[in-house]
Structure formats: C-alpha cells, structure tokens
Image (spheres, rainbow, N blue to C red):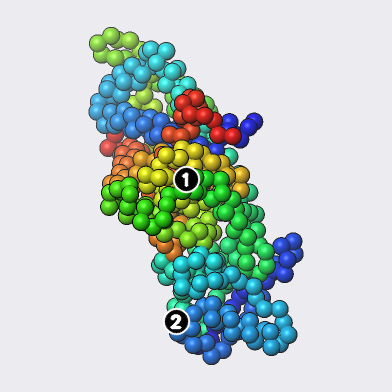
Amino acid sequence: MTERNAISTIGLKILMGITGFILVGYVSLHMLGNWQVFLPAVYINQYAYLLKSIPLVLWTVRLVLFVAFVVHIWSAIRLAQLRRSARPVPYDQRKPNGASWESRSMLLTGIGLGLFVVFHLYQFTWHLPPFSAFEGFTARLSETSRSVPDVHRMMVEGLRNLWVAGAYLLGMGCLFFHVRHGIDGLFSSLGLVNRRSFPWERWLAHALGWVFFLGFSIIPVAIALGWVR
Amino acid sequence: MRVILRIWRQPFPEERGGFVEYVRENVRPDMSFLEMLDELNHDLELEGKEPIAFEHDCREGICGSCSLMINGRPHGPGRATTSCQVYMRSFRDGEQITVEPFRTKAFPVIKDLVVDRSAFDRILQAGGYISVGTGQAPEANTIPVPHDVAEEAFDAAHCIGCGACVATCINSAAVLFVGAKARHLGLLPQGKLEQDLRVLRMVRAMDREGFGACSFTRACEAVCPKEISVEVISALNRAYWLARTKEFLGWRKPIA
C-alpha cells in the first residue's frame, strides 16, 4: 500500500468521529423509544412491533450500526497500537496537565461500553439463558388482536434483578464519560470548531452525556423502585 | 533553600539510562532552574565528573531549545513558560524534583536530558514554508490582510517548536505543532495558495515520524509555553480532509 492510500492518523480520527456520530444518533433514538415504558404497556409493544415490521428497514439499520460499531472498534485498536508504539519508554513521573479523566480513559470506557452492548443484546435481543423466558412473553395489541412480543414485561422483569440493574447503571456510567469526551473530540476531528465555538461545543458534549446518563438510568431505577410494573 | 534532584542520566542513545539523585544546598530562590543546573554542573566538573547534558540557548523563553520534563510537566510548573523561565521559588524547600527528557519514539534521547527533535524539522521541510519569495519587510503591506486574520495567523506563529505538546500528549501526537504551522501559513494570502499541498505533505511527514493521533485531551494547550490554542488542531483536521477529498476525487494532482 502506498503512503497516499494508507489511512493517516487524522483519517483514523475522522473514521472514529463519523462512526461515533452514527452510534450517538442511534443511542438518542433508542433513549426516546425507551421512554415509552412509562406509558401503558401497549405503547412500547406497538412501537417494538413497528420497528421489526419492515425487515428491509430493520436489517438496513442493523447493518449500518454493525458496520459503524466494527469500524469504530477497528480504529480504536489501530489508535491504541499507535499510542503504544509512539512512546516505547514511559515517563517516571507524569501529570494529566489539564487533560480530563474521561479524555484519558476513552479506551477503558469504550471497552466497558462494548461489553455492556454485548450483554444488552445477549439479554434483550438473543434471549439466551438465563434470559430464555423472555422469548415466551407475548401481548395482544388492542386494535388488531395480533399477538406480539411483550417488550414492556420483558423490560420490567429483566431489570427488576438488582444485579442486572447495576450492570445497566455501570454501562450508562461508561456511556456518560465516553459521550462527554467523544462529542468533544468529534467536533475537533471533523474540524468543526474554533476558539469561539469551544464553549457551546463543550456545553453540548457535557449536556448530552448527562441527558443520556439520566435518560437511560431512570428506567432501571424506576423499575427497581416499583414505579413501572 | 534545599532541593533533591532526581535527574535522568544516559551517556549514549543505545545505553540504558537511569535516575541519579543530587542534593543541592543553598539554592537561591531567585535563581532560574537552568542556573541551578549550571551550578550543579560546575560542581560536577570540579569533582571530575561528567556534567549533565541539557539543551538551552536564548534563556529568555523564545527559542524553544530547552526541553525538560520537570515533575511530570513539560517545562515545569507555571503556565506559558519554558524550562529556562522557571525559577527556584516555584518549588518548596526540601522538595524532590524529578527531571526527565521529553519521551517519544520520534524524539530519541541523545544524552541525559537532550533529545533529537529533528523530526519537527523534517515535517517543516515537507511543507512548512512558502515557495515563492514574499519580499522584504515593506512588501508585507502590498497585499492587504484584515487585522483579525493577521492576529489569528500571528497567534499560531508564536509556536517555537519546543515539542512540549508531544511530550505531554498521551498519544505523543504532534498535531498542535503541525496545526500551528499550517494555520499560520494557511491564513495569509501568500501561504493560502499552497495550503492543500502543505497540509497533505506535513501530515504524511508527521505520520512517517511515528507521532500518534490526537485524542483531544487539551493537555498540549495547557503546557504550551506560547499558549497555542487547540483550535489549530481542528483547523488542521478540516484542511486535511478537504485536501484529501480533492486528491481522492482527482480534483488536484496527487502528492508524490
């Protein structure tokens, strides 16, 4: 491969930014969808049925997400290799020198988040043991009397277990830090900011981190406290 | 005052280095850090020992020669300073001070605290210039430049190429340096014409030297003696992907 065709360090960061943006966009929609759990059960069940009713749309979205996820992880591995090889002899003393914890821990929170996503799919998409019972939860939509998966019951029973709820909160903690710095880095990687736009851009990154963290965490908390049954 | 120095000693690039402890008594607080090292070296020479090698030139914070990692911070304590502008009053009496060379594969250690920063020179040789004669000082005003643009270009031009940004970066990235050079030249009318070429060449030269990629931790900005803003990194990324897209689509001649 010639140097021109090899992906540059900036190219890797741009890939990271674009795929991260796709994933953040999905996470936003996911959170809005999840909030329907606070409405009567029929709302989220109908919504879940709608999402899966057009296979072409479903699989296109899944494919885009899968590719974004794989490219994001592949770039992260390349960047981690570059980081390792760029400083063979470590410092004896080093300080963060103004670098935030989340900006230095993207790999850690990213691995945490990746493991969480696998657990989340294992539990709520693949229904593998010990979550096999979810497969049998069905409900009827009032107007069609069609039998559909009972997502509402699955969420309530799945998140009632305090260990599972704890794992979700930990995953959302990773998401909080990853998004807080990820959005910040994304704007820089794509070259969209300057010193006049840094304040609002950082405000947006931090606000989105909090919105995702609180917006998602409220669900297991509400279920654990018995607000949603 | 009294300080305990832990200084990295390494006689040759290939040799294994290590820390050597020196206790300095009667250090005057108004001495600069380098003057304190000068006195230590003077004493070492009187004892017939090899003095500590460290780089320095102007000693007024404008040349970018000094390059010490003092207690885990490039150029030591204080904002917007070079190692030569650090004074002993910045340390506590009896404090242990660890002094290391800048560490990255692209800056190999030559001896003790001296590192080879010619990787930066090679990046500049790749594209950090304007290829036409821009005239003498009076010609500076022949092409009008808006004041705010001139100011922004000058802010980036403050970079003295000391390498503190690379030294503190968790990735050993050189984008603050490269960004400052590309921004400085790319904002001005004489430099704008070659900006795509410059950016592609400099970024490729940077990657060849083995610098890492930017994680945008902003530590570089925090330690930069000239307070170069991380906005130059964003500008470099923007200039790079614009130039790379043009090259990829064949809208401009590929860079050899």
Task: State which quarter of the image contains the C terminus of chain A.
Answer: top left
Of the image marks 2 and 1, the number of the one nearer the N terminus: 2
Task: Give the amino acid at mark 1.
Answer: Val
Find the residue positioned furthest to the right.
B15
Q: Secondary structure at mark 1?
A: loop
Q: Amino acid at mark 2?
A: Arg
Q: Can residue A123 be seen in this snapshot?
A: no
The foreground one among B155 and B194 is: B194
Circle 2 marks a residue in which chain?
B
Residue A227 point in image, percent of width and height: 27, 37
Q: Nearer the viewer, mark 2 or mark 1?
A: 1
Q: Vertically, is A112 above or below B247?
A: below
Depth check: A217 or A188 in front?
A188
Quick one: quadrant of the N terminus of chain A? top right
Q: Which residue is mark 2?
A: B89
* Badge number at residue B182: none
Against B223, residue A34 (above or below) is above
- Whether the residues at callouts 2 and 1 have beta carbons within 8 Å, the answer is no
**How many discs appear?**
2
Image position, residue A37 (x, y; %): 30, 29
Distance from disc 2 to disc 1, alpha carbons, whole Å, reads: 48 Å
Q: Residues within 10 Å of mark 1 (few under 14, many from 20)?
A: few
B119 relative to A148, above or below: below
Q: Chain of mark 1?
A: B
Quadrant of the rendered image containing residue A189? top left
Residue tagged 1: B132
Q: Nearer the viewer, residue A183 or B109?
A: B109
Where is residue A57? Give x, y as percent: 39, 16
Q: Measuring 49% from the left and 45% from the top, which residue is drawn there?
A: B131
> Which residue is painted at 63% across and 32% down in the image?
A2
B172 or A154, which is in the foreground? Answer: B172
At mark 2, the secondary structure is: helix
